[in-house]
Image: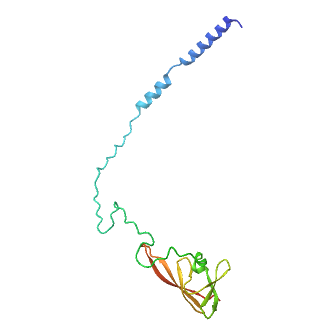
Amino acid sequence: MSAAVLRLLCAFGLLAMLAACSGGMGDLEQWVSEVKARKSTQVEPIPQIKPYEAYAYDAGTRRDPFVAEQPKRPVGTGPGPRPDPKRPKEALEEYPLDALRMQGIIRTPRATFGLIKSPDNIIHRVSVGNYMGQNFGQVKSVTETEITLTELVADGFGGYVQRPATLALSQ
């Protein structure tokens, strides 16, 4: 193709595009006039903002929410009995008391021993003064039907309270 023909085709294309763009804007003008002719709707007014009213908090007998609560004492710092932290733990202290079963007794001239079955099916021998259970339970007496203990239980106020417990003979 020659350069003259190419120029002629480009000029013809430009004229065609300009002719397409030069169409009237009658339809746009008609739409604008229709919108302007519509009746305007009522716009709701902006809602009024209520003024801020301060509130005075009267605690009365209740705790002041802006003052931190007094921290509870750590366990073992309160008055009353407390466990001996230096005492070595005994084998039956790793199990809760309700997981242990009394199987019987052994009586010797020196003492009476209770036979306790732990959850791992091992029979342990305990006598007065031994410890068992997870609440520092100390054996106080061993009879043919039960073992009596005194447990030390945290009271929630930093101390401990003594609580009696028994382990009855299993049938």
The residue at 32%/47% (across/down) is 49
Give the residue furthest to the bottom: 109
In this rendered view, identify the residue nearer to me: 168 or 56: 168
| Image position of 69 with respect to 90: above or below | above
The residue at 50%/25% (across/down) is 27
| Image position of 43 with respect to 151: above or below | above
Relative horizontal placement of residue 30, taking residue 143 as reference (left or right): left
Give the residue furthest to the front: 110
Quadrant of image for the N terminus: top right
Q: Picture coordinates of residue 95 (x, y %)? A: 59, 76
Quadrant of image for the C terminus: bottom right
Asked where in the image residue 35 lies, by quadrant, the reply is top left
| Image position of 123 with respect to 26: above or below | below
Asked where in the image residue 67 lies, by quadrant, the reply is bottom left
Give the residue furthest to the right: 1
The residue at 44%/69% (across/down) is 74
Q: Picture coordinates of residue 66 (x, y %)? A: 34, 60
Relative horizontal placement of residue 144, taking residue 46 as reference (left or right): right
Q: Picture coordinates of residue 61 (x, y %)? A: 30, 69
